[in-house]
Image: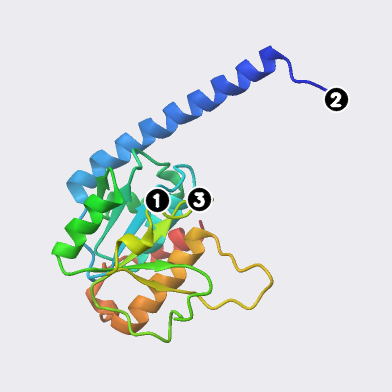
Amino acid sequence: MCQKSPLFASETMRRRYNRRLDMEARFIKAARRNRVDAVPGIHSCIVVLDGLKPDFNIGKIFRTAEAFSIREIHLINIAYFDPDPAKGSVRWLPFFHHETFADCFEQLSGRGYTCITFEPGQGRLLGRERLPQKSAFVFGHEEFGLSFDRTDYPGIQSLSIAQWGHVQSLNVSIAASIALYEYVRCYGRPAAEGLRQSPAAITSRSRR
């Protein structure tokens, strides 16, 4: 069995550290623009990201959430993330940090929101249940799931996304896209109320 040398391991750790520093710097830059330009979306829906990995899916979810003009995103125990997959969406969509889900839940409940998680085998399917207009969709870590015990929060609803394959699993950014599309299908405002863009801007974004 071939063993990796200490020099190789040290170089790998150095690259990971530098990559993290680069990601943090890009996040700080994006967050500064966000504080100046972000405004709540035209739809009441909120997304809660509970401890997701910082390097890919968060940015993808921002991109989808901004496209559907949701109200805002809440980040739990996420100090920073890679803004590049968001393709500029971080600039326009308000987001807020929380140390724990309990803090986030208390705040959203006080604003009249119903938190909704997505788990296989719940019996209640997205698309067949009426969503509250003030829905807060909660998505957990890609490997470990939610950071909290759902039974500690009786007010939380849980839905499943219908799947027909052997592997009952969806990437979290795909699950978020499906949930947000279903929300705007139910409550979507007229397209004319959204952000107006030139055809050139729309074309350039669609090619990315």
Q: How many marks?
A: 3
- Taking the view exactly as shown, the residue that stands out farthest to the right is 1
Label 1 Cα crowd, 10 Å radius (few <14 / some 14-19 / many 20+): some
Q: Pointers 3 and 1 in contact (CB under 8 A)?
A: yes
Which residue position holds label 3? 144
Local secondary structure at mark 3:
loop
Which residue position holds label 2? 1
Answer above or below: position of 169 versus 99: below
Answer above or below: position of 45 versus 145: below
Q: Tell me: 60 left or right of 189.
A: right
Local secondary structure at mark 2:
loop
Q: Which residue is at a point 36% across and 65% down the rendered structure image?
A: 67
Q: Residue 139: name its quadrant.
A: bottom left
Q: 119 or 87, which is in the foreground?
A: 119
- The amino acid type, in three-letter code, at marker 3 is Phe
Q: Which residue is at a point 36% across and 50% down the rendered structure image?
A: 88
Q: Position of residue 71 (x, y in %)?
A: 24, 64
